[in-house]
Image (spheres, rainbow, N blue to C red):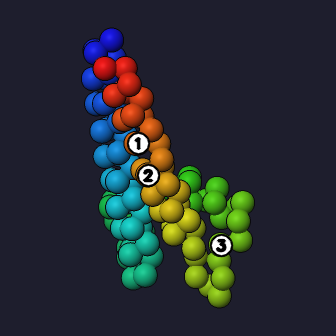
Amino acid sequence: MFVFSNFMMALTGIIDFLLTAYMWIIIGRAVISWVNADPHNPIVRFLFEVTEPLLGRIRRILPTSIGGIDFSPVILIIIIMFLQSFLVPTLRQFAHGLG
């Protein structure tokens, strides 16, 4: 059972890393939106393509634009922070219980 426990701990670390990396990608997308970035730049296209599926869903569900300001990145970062403070510790405790 310790093998599954170690696997769960490793998976939890990867999930935590991916959530943190995605949060920084969202922050990068927000910063890019403040300046007049070239939309044909590969980095700008990457940031847009990676974040737009989730940000677009949030925009469809909630009226996030107040006064011309898009709050969907803030909402998505809050969701990621919730997952990091709930899901990751829960998986770690589950893995410790298996060991």
Residue 48: in sight, yes or no?
A: no
The reply to whether dot 1 and dot 3 touch (C-beta < 8 Å) is no
The percent coordinates of residue 76 (x first, y second) are 52, 60
Q: Secondary structure at mark 3?
A: loop
Q: Residues within 10 Å of mark 1 (few under 14, many from 20)?
A: many
Q: Secondary structure at mark 2?
A: helix
Q: Which residue is mark 2?
A: 85
Q: Secondary structure at mark 1?
A: helix
The reply to whether dot 2 and dot 1 touch (C-beta < 8 Å) is yes
The percent coordinates of residue 66 (x first, y second) are 66, 82
At a point 36% along the width and 67% down the height, the residue shown is 28
Q: CA distance from mark 1 to mark 3?
A: 27 Å
Q: Which residue is mark 3?
A: 64
At a point 45% along the width and 38% down the height, the residue shown is 90
Upstream in sequence: badge 3 or badge 2: 3
Q: CA distance from mark 2 to mark 1?
A: 6 Å
Kindly give the residue lying farthest to the bottom in the view shown.
Answer: 67
Q: Which residue is mark 1?
A: 88
The type of residue carrying mark 1 is Val
Q: Residues within 10 Å of mark 2 (few under 14, many from 20)?
A: few
